[in-house]
Each structure stands twice: as structure tokens, then as C-alpha cells.
Amino acid sequence: MLNKRTTQRFSPKTRILFSYLAMLLGAFSIAVSFNLFLLPNRIASGGVSGISIILNTLTQIPPAYTQWALNIPLFIAGVLVLGKQFGIKTAVGSIVLPLFVLLTQHWTPPTQDPLLAALYGGLGVGLGLGLVFRGRGSTGGLDVAAQIIHRVMGIRLGLAVAAMDGLVILSAGLFISAENALYALIGLFATSKTIDIIQSGFQTSKAAFIISKHPDRVSDTILHELDRGLTRLQGVGGYTGDDRPVLLTVVGQNEVVRLKLLVRDADPEAFVIITDAAEVLGEGFHDDRDKL
């Protein structure tokens, strides 16, 4: 009998096909959001797309050409500095995204309200980037530059990415307007939150740490009444120095109330800590290992 964790729903070729479809769909979503919301309202919320908006404002150069002019050299530099593992998907993203921007540049913007544009543009870009990342791809751009800086100078990658986006938004404040830079920050925030949702999903789980004088009774209740697994951790009382088992279990958001009631019935004096679990992989929970 095959182990459930080693079986795959899709063949390798199908998974590769789905990954490229996710990349293309994601790039299309980014391009549409760029042309419908960000570009018409001059919201340069970081990245090469933000640079292309600034240059378009100053020189009228079509954004797609600026994006190609920056993406392709950055990709070549990435291959030279980061190695061949940098991947063909980054090359595809670096070329296809500006192409979609060029093809959708004449679409009519639905709003001239910069706040709505920042929010919906950020959502659309976040959706697109989330799909690209789910396809294990990249759109290139300043993320490549950040990786090069990280490799050469040793600066943390997250800090390098934030610094690059910050410079673009600061430039937007100088060359477009301070108000547009503020809207760009809103768009960047919407993008980051949407990426998190696409990556982790809407379903949230809770991790519960339970310290009880009756761990066996609480364990049996969770295992048989709630039908959830748990792990016993070794703990020591800070005041007494006595051994004190700590029970760790993960439940869905809709099971939290029942968990608290069951633990209270098993041991009214139990100490319970419930915290958010951003993502849970494994039996009984969401699992990405058989997906793209």
C-alpha cells in the first residue's frame, strides 16, 4: 500500500504545465492591474513597474519598453552572479510580463480615484505575484537586483527588497508627488497582504499549548472527542522545578471554542495558550506538496 504522503495527484509533466500556466495567468493579472489602476493614476508602488511609471511620467517612454530594458540585463546579471539555477522561469517572467503590459496598454481604466486604484491595483498585483510564486517562478526585476546585493554584500534579502522598493517610492515622491508616494505605500501594503493570502490560503489554524496537572485526561479528550492529534513536550515548572508536560495541538478556527470547552471539562485549572498558525502542512490540514 502506498504511503499517502508519497503519492502525487499529478504527473511531473502535468505539474510543470500547471506551474507555467500559473505564471502566465499571474503575469497577466499583474499587467492588467498595472494598466487599469497603477499607471493611469501614477502609483509607483516599487519594483521595475514603479520605475517604468516614473520614467513614463518624465519622458513618455512606454512602460513595457522600460521594463524590458531593465529586466533583461538584470536577468543576465542574475545568471552571472547567482548561477544557472536562477532558472528559465525567471527568464520567461522577465519577458512575458512586459509583453502583457504592452498588449493591454490601451484598456480603459475603470477609475480615476487614486485610493481605489492603489487598493485594487495592489490587490491585482498581489494576486498575480502570488500565482507566479505558486508556480515557483519569478517576474525578475528588482527582486533579482536584491538577490544580487544579498549575495555580493551580505545584506539580508528582506532588507534588500524593502530598500529597493523604498527607493522607488521615494523617487516617486520626488519626481511625481508626495501624495502619489503615499498612495504607492497603500498599494504595496495591499500587494504584500494579498500575496500572503494566495500563498497560505484563507483558512487559518490555531496552535494550542496546554499545561495541565492531568495531561492524560486532557490528551484522551482531544484525541477522542475532538479527533485531533497532539504532541507532548517536556516542560519544567519555573517556580516549583517539577516536570510539567506541555500538550501541543493544532485545530481549525472553527474548532477553537470546542477545544476550550473540552479542556475546561477535563481540567478546569488547565493553563491554555492559543496562537495563530500561519500555515499548517500535514495530515488533516492543507498540503501543498502535491500541487504545483
Image (cartoon, rainbow, N blue to C red):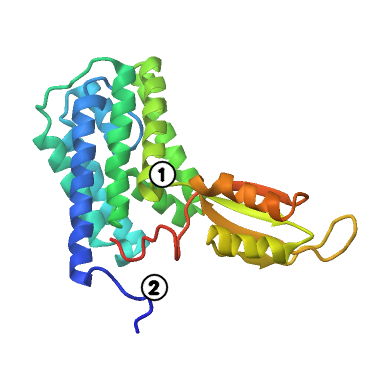
Depth check: 77 or 244 in front? 244
Provide residue 226's location: percent of width, then percent of height: 55, 57
- Image-quadrant location for residue 34: top left
Camera-near label (2 vs 1) is: 2
| In contact (CB < 8 Å): disc 2 and disc 1 | no
Depth check: 279 or 122 in front? 279
SS assignment at label 1? helix
- Image-quadrant location for residue 30: top left
Residue 34 visible in the displayed image: yes
SS assignment at label 2? loop
Q: Left of 271 or right of it: where is 97?
A: left
| Residue beneath disc 2 | 5
Depth check: 64 or 272 in front? 272
| Residue beneath disc 1 | 196
Q: Left of 58 or right of it: where is 216?
A: right
Provide residue 54's location: percent of width, then percent of height: 28, 26
Residue 277 visible in the displayed image: no
- CA distance separating discs 2 and 1: 25 Å
Quadrant where the image shows the C terminus: bottom left
Determine the residue positioned at 22% across, 49% down.
94
Quadrant where the image shows the N terminus: bottom left
Q: Left of 280 or right of it: where is 179?
A: left
Provide residue 101's location: percent of width, then percent of height: 16, 36
Determine the residue positioned at 82% across, 66% down.
243
